[in-house]
Image: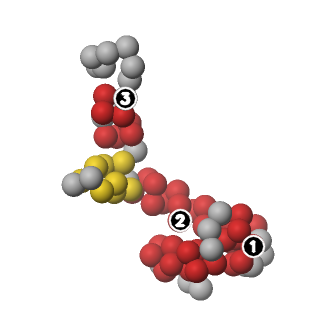
Amino acid sequence: LATTDTITPDDLRDHVRGTLITNQAVVPTPALKETEHDLILKTIAATNGNRSAAAKLLGMSREGLRKKMQRHGIAQ
């Protein structure tokens, strides 16, 4: 429980925060990776395979989308 009137991220357990913190680096949980994977696939499908449009909808560059697809093992 919180020791003050304000709850901070430090007061929450790791599974509630959704990430694990290791040496100050934030490591995405498996659920976050799966969600990102699904979002990429759905966005590409929604844009009829148009990677540039998908990247724009996702708020990233086409190159950024390409790298994320590669990390997730999504065929290009």
Residue assigned mark 2: 37
Tell whether label 1 touches label 3 (CB within 8 Å). no
Residue 24 seen in this snapshot = yes
Q: Amino acid at mark 3?
A: Thr
Residue assigned mark 1: 53
Which sits in the foreground, 16 or 65? Answer: 65
Secondary structure beneath dot 3 equals loop
Quarter of the rendering containing residue 75: bottom right
Quarter of the rendering containing residue 12: top left
Which is closer to the viewer, label 2 or label 3? 3
Tell whether label 1 touches label 2 (CB within 8 Å). no
Between discs 2 and 1, the one toward the N terminus: 2
Q: Position of residue 40 (x, y in %)?
A: 60, 67
62 on left or right of 31:
right
Q: Residue at x 30, y 19 (%)?
A: 2
Q: Residue at x 53, y 61 (%)?
A: 36
Which is closer to the viewer, label 2 or label 1? 1
Q: Position of residue 39 (x, y in %)?
A: 61, 61
Which sits in the foreground, 52 or 46? Answer: 52
Mark linked to residue 8: 3
Q: Residue at x 59, y 85 (%)?
A: 76
Q: Position of residue 1 (x, y in %)?
A: 29, 19
